[in-house]
Every structure is written in C-alpha cells, then in structure tokens.
Image (spheres, grey):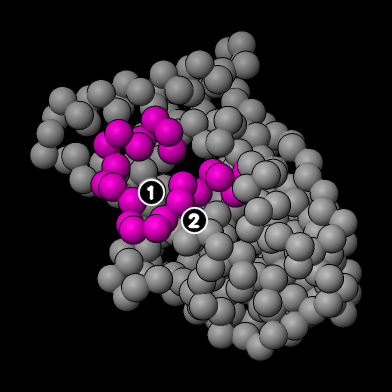
Amino acid sequence: MGDKLKDAHRAMWASGDYPSLASEIIPELGAVLVRAAGVTAGKRVLDIAAGSGNAAIAAALEGADVVASDLTPELLQAGRDDAAKRGAELEWKEADAEALPFGDAEFDTVLSCVGIMFAPHHQASADELVRVCRSGGTVGLLNWTPEGFIGQMFATMKPYAPPPPQGAQPPPLWGRPEHVERLLGDRVTDVSFEKKTVRVDRFGKPEEFRDYFKSRYGPTIAVYRRIADDPDKVAALDAALAELARSHDVGTSSLVTEWEYLIVTARKR
C-alpha cells in the first residue's frame, strides 16, 4: 500500500468510533471466529487488521499467545484499554496487512475478523497471511458477504464513494468462497466455508441505524464527507441507507436485521 493510501486508510478508520460500534453491534463475532479456528491455550496467534481486538482479545482469554496487528494506532489503543478492563494479556503492533512485519511461519493460527477484507489489494494481504502461518497451522477468517446486509450497504454507498485505488478490490469479495479459494490457492488444504448471520436489534427504526453508521463507521463517514457539498446526494444516500435497513427488517415493533458473514478455516500445507 502506498503511503498516501495507507494514510487515508488510517484516517478513515480513526474517524468516528469503530471500537464502540464493534463492541455494541458485533461483540460476539471475535469469539465465534476463535472457536471456529480451534484456538487453545499456548497457541501463537496473529490477528490481522485486528481493529480494537474483537478476535484478538477473545483468543487471549483462551490462554493463547496473541499479537493483534492493525494499521490504525487509535484502534489499537482502544483495544489495549478494553483488554486491560477484561484482564486479557496480549501484544499490540501497528502493521500493514499487505506487508506484515513478522517472519515466515511465525504463528500457529492466523485470524482476521471483518478486518483483512478492507485491505485494498486482496492478493497481497492473502499472501502475507499465508506466509506468516506455519505448516500445519490454521487460517481463520470471518468476512461480510456481498449478498448480506453489510455487503449491500457497501453497494448502496458505492455510487457516492470515490473511485477505488488502482488495483483495489471491493471488501465484500472476501465473503465469496470462490474468491477466497483463488486468493489462498494450493497453499492451504482442508478448506471449510460456513455462512452464518448475526442478529442486530439495537436500533428502533431504519433512520437510527443510518445515523449511527454516519457518526461512527469510518467508511460511511468518508462517503458522506465526499458528498457534503451536494445536499441532493446527501439526501439520496440518507434515503437509500434507511431503505436498505427497512428492506432487511424482520422485526415487528422495532428494527431487527440479520447480517450475513462467511467463516473460512483452512490448514496451511
């Protein structure tokens, strides 16, 4: 990732308040991934694009020897604070998913929970995650699917977003099994895919969901900043995001949505 692109990514994820979003909306997903990857005490674990440590802290609480890595120092600091409150001991390291500062085969388990999918160059980050995993070790990923709620949110925002950087691919592709198979190639075996959903019932109505993401979620904030001088576009995106939530509502008295994700586990050859 070029320095300008890295800086832009850091700034995007530092904007808003992703740590509170992760803890309020999807607190259980890190533990779901840790269980799927079979993390146990004594395993050396790397969480790539860990954010504030959704999966890393869960792995540390299992007794694993964990490194949480992320490009954005503000997220790591929030993770340190959360880990201290929860009595989890682990290492936090600023790192680019596309150029990890770790040795070959350094980890027994390499994880990423809705994290690595946001590194723009998918093959580069996939190559890195495989490289740092030892032979016989486990790769475990949890990513939003293109068809699921968050994938559809990105599709809704796309017409208002800046054009992607050269060579970048859309994040939700990591939620497509055939895409992940191509990225990992024949360097892994025993590949397993499982689609699940997380139930989100925190919002009373669609507009509450939209306003929450407008104020806390870096990618949404970045899109709104780009169109801030065009009230018509802002109004159109406001309506589109509220309609997205309304169209996925399975609740009766308040908004309830199911967000689909893909769990991938594989063994490094």
Magenta residues (range): 154-175
What residue is drawn where x is 32% and y is 75%? 3
Q: Is residue 44 above or below residue 230?
A: below
Is residue 124 or residue 87 the one in the foreground? 124
Separation of marks 1 and 2 at Cα, in angstroms: 10 Å
* Circle nearer the N terminus (1, 2): 2
Is residue 244 or residue 3 the one in the foreground? 3
Residue 146: in magenta span: no
Extreme-front residue of the structure: 186
What residue is drawn where x is 62% and y is 85%? 102
Q: x%, y% of residue 109? A: 78, 71
Q: In the image, which disc is placed on residue 118?
A: 2
Quadrant of residue 113 in the image? bottom right
* Within-10-Å neighbours for mark 2: few <14, some 14–19, many 20+: many
Q: Are marks 1 and 2 in contact (CB under 8 Å)?
A: yes
Residue designated by label 1? 219
Give left or right: position of 124 versus 120: right
Tell me if residue 263 can be seen: yes
* Within-10-Å neighbours for mark 1: few <14, some 14–19, many 20+: many
Q: x%, y% of residue 97? A: 53, 70
Give left or right: position of 204 versus 61: left
Give the residue type at disc 1: Pro
Q: Nearer the viewer, mark 1 or mark 2?
A: 2
Extreme-bottom residue of the structure: 103
Q: x%, y% of residue 27? A: 65, 49
Residue 167: in magenta span: yes
Quadrant including the C terminus: bottom right
Q: Is residue 204 above or below residue 117?
A: above
Quadrant of residue 144 in the image? top right
Extreme-top residue of the structure: 252
Quadrant of residue 188 in the image? bottom right
What residue is drawn where x is 74% and y is 36%? 196
